[in-house]
Image: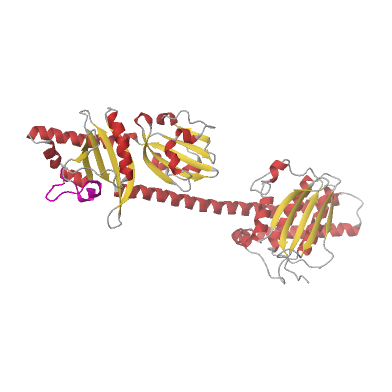
């Protein structure tokens, strides 16, 4: 049998499906079946195939749409005498449905009730009592089980068998002065809409002449005093043609089922919380790996340049000094790895908005460009920076270390896709007319750009375009998360004349004079 998709398994406790056949289906927002699994033939829905309209085969759902929250439809009756508990719940882009065959359970309940009824008849015959006396001999048991038993005629009049417990009073005509509860008749058309609707189905069932039973499912009514009580009705036709109706008080069973569903919902919430924490740790681990690789890439670029001949001594010393600084930077990262791991998630949510201590975007860009030039030269790329003439400082709302990584990700992305012999430009501009004032940074290359179909998911988690083999797909995802946390925006547009243009906009914290 097909396994439940993880998306569905989180919604309904697997313990519900320990026994019996089940089936599931996922339906999109247009009502079209997208996936299905399990034994749908058991429920008489072999035609419920992907691409078909679900409501044509599942009309009992029409009154439940749209599915805004998980809920249960207990003891839904399908064709061929199959009864099922049904769960429906929202999923991305539609809803899911799981049906669990509980026919054996319903049949068992029906058999127990029918056997009790037959036992009463046998007892009546053995003792010479009438049917009323036989039922009265079992009144204690019926009261204990919180059941009210009626026999209905072809005109739909249902008469009580035996003395009714007080909880059944809302369902029967008031007793006349001096009248015993035995012989009272069931109310109809008096505001008990659920029971009235079920009795219409019961009349059709009884008229079929087939022995068996029909279950209503659980419903709840507000009794006098505002207290809510829950009930379930069962229509049965015995071999003698008697039309029997049993109404059972099921408060405890309904409360247990609701408790199970509530525990399932809570388990789902706990699962989502845990999954969110795991995702944060995954991003954190990828960020640490990225931090450790960046200095190494710079050192490899320097060493590749030193390997060549004809460099001036001053140039050699400059490159060696740069390599040593990158090696020291990586060493510090490795020694602080455990501390970084503990603090990284909190740091991702914090940033500086004090103009005197906020990161200077102009300085960060100069440092990153200077560090990247050797690697770009090794790839036969030119790297140019253009900053506003004034002001000298560009303090922005950001976290200094995270801003360094965002810019590094954008430069690394350009280096990966820019053709050899071309130029990668980094431009910064100040927009004082915006509210608040903003600084925009653009990284432009002359690569192939991003196909239109991939642009919408470019900043999604694990999104990778053509030529991204070996990448984790988290670089641009990190950029978006960090920049939006700081109140900024980021995006992509095709570069005029061909190529790609990635941009970020951050709040400018400097003087606007």
Residue 390, compared with residue 242, is above or below; it is below
Q: What is the basis of the colouring in this image?
A: secondary structure
Residue 412, compared with residue 127, is above or below; it is below
Q: Nearer the viewer, residue 427 or 363?
A: 427
Residue 126: image location, x then y, percent:
9, 33
Q: Residue at x 74, y 44 (%)?
A: 450
Residue 177 part of the magenta segment: yes
Query: Which corner quadrant of the image does residue 116 belong to?
Result: top left
Q: Residue furthest left?
A: 128
Per the picture, the main secondary structure of the magenta-coloured stretch is loop
Instruction: Mark yes or no: residue 18 visible.
Output: no
Which range of residues does the magenta coloring cover? Answer: 164-182
Residue 341: image location, x then y, percent:
61, 58
Residue 377 part of the magenta segment: no
Q: Quadrant of the N terminus?
A: top left
Residue 406, compared with residue 197, is above or below; it is below
Query: Which corner quadrant of the image does residue 134 belong to?
Result: top left
Q: Is residue 293 left or right of residue 83?
A: right
Q: Nearer the viewer, residue 304 or 248?
A: 248
Q: Is residue 26 left or right of residue 109?
A: right
Instruction: Mark yes or no: residue 201 visible.
Output: yes
Q: Nearer the viewer, residue 328 or 421?
A: 421
Q: Is residue 260 left or right of residue 161?
A: right
Q: Nearer the viewer, residue 16 or 431?
A: 431
């Amino acid at each position: 049998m097909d396994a439940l998709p993880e998306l569905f398994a989180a919604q309904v406790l697997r313990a519900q499906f320990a026994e019996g056949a089940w089936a599931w289906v996922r339906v999109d927002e247009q009502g079209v079946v997208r996936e299905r699994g399990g034994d749908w033939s058991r429920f008489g829905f072999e035609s419920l195939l992907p691409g078909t309209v679900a409501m044509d085969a599942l009309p009992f759902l029409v009154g439940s749409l749209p599915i805004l929250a998980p809920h249960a439809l207990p003891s839904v009756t399908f064709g061929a005498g199959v009864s099922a508990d049904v769960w429906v719940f929202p999923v991305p882009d539609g809803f899911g449905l799981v049906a669990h065959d509980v026919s054996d359970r319903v049949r068992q309940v029906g058999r127990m009730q029918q056997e009790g009824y037959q036992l009463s008849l046998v007892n009546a015959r053995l003792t010479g009592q009438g049917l009323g006396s036989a039922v009265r001999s079992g009144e204690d048991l019926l009261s204990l089980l919180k059941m009210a038993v009626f026999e209905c005629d072809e005109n739909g009049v249902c008469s009580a068998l035996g003395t009714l417990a007080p909880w059944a009073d809302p369902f029967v005509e008031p007793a006349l002065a001096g009248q015993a509860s035995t012989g009272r008749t069931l109310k109809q058309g008096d505001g008990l809409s659920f029971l009235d609707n079920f009795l219409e189905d019961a009349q059709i069932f009884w008229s079929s002449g087939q022995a068996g039973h029909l279950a209503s499912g659980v419903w709840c009514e507000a009794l006098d005093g505002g207290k809510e009580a829950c009930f379930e009705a069962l229509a049965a036709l015995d071999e003698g043609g008697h039309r029997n109706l049993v109404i059972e008080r099921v408060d405890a069973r309904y409360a247990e089922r609701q408790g199970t569903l509530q525990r399932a919902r809570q388990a789902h919430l706990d699962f989502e919380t845990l999954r969110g924490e795991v995702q944060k740790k995954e991003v954190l681990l990828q960020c640490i790996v990225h931090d450790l690789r960046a200095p190494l890439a710079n050192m490899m670029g320097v060493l590749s340049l030193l390997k060549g001949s004809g460099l001036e001594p001053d140039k050699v010393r400059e490159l060696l000094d740069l390599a040593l600084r990158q090696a020291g930077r990586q060493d510090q990262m490795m020694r602080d790895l455990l501390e970084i791991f503990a603090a990284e998630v909190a740091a991702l949510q914090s940033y500086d908005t004090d103009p005197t201590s906020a990161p200077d975007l102009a300085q960060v860009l100069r440092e990153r460009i200077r560090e990247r030039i050797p690697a770009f030269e090794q790839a036969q790329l030119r790297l140019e920076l253009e900053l506003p003439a004034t002001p000298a400082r560009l303090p922005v709302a950001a976290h200094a270390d995270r801003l360094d990584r965002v810019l590094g990700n954008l430069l690394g992305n350009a280096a990966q896709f820019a053709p050899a012999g071309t130029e990668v430009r980094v431009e910064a501009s100040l927009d004082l007319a915006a509210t608040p004032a903003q600084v925009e940074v653009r990284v432009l290359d002359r690569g192939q750009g991003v196909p239109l179909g991939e642009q919408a998911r470019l900043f999604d988690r694990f999104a990778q375009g053509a030529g991204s083999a070996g990448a984790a797909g988290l670089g641009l995802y990190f950029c978006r998360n960090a920049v939006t946390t700081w109140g900024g925006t980021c995006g992509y547009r095709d570069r005029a004349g061909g190529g790609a243009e990635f941009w970020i906009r951050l709040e400018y914290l400097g003087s606007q004079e």
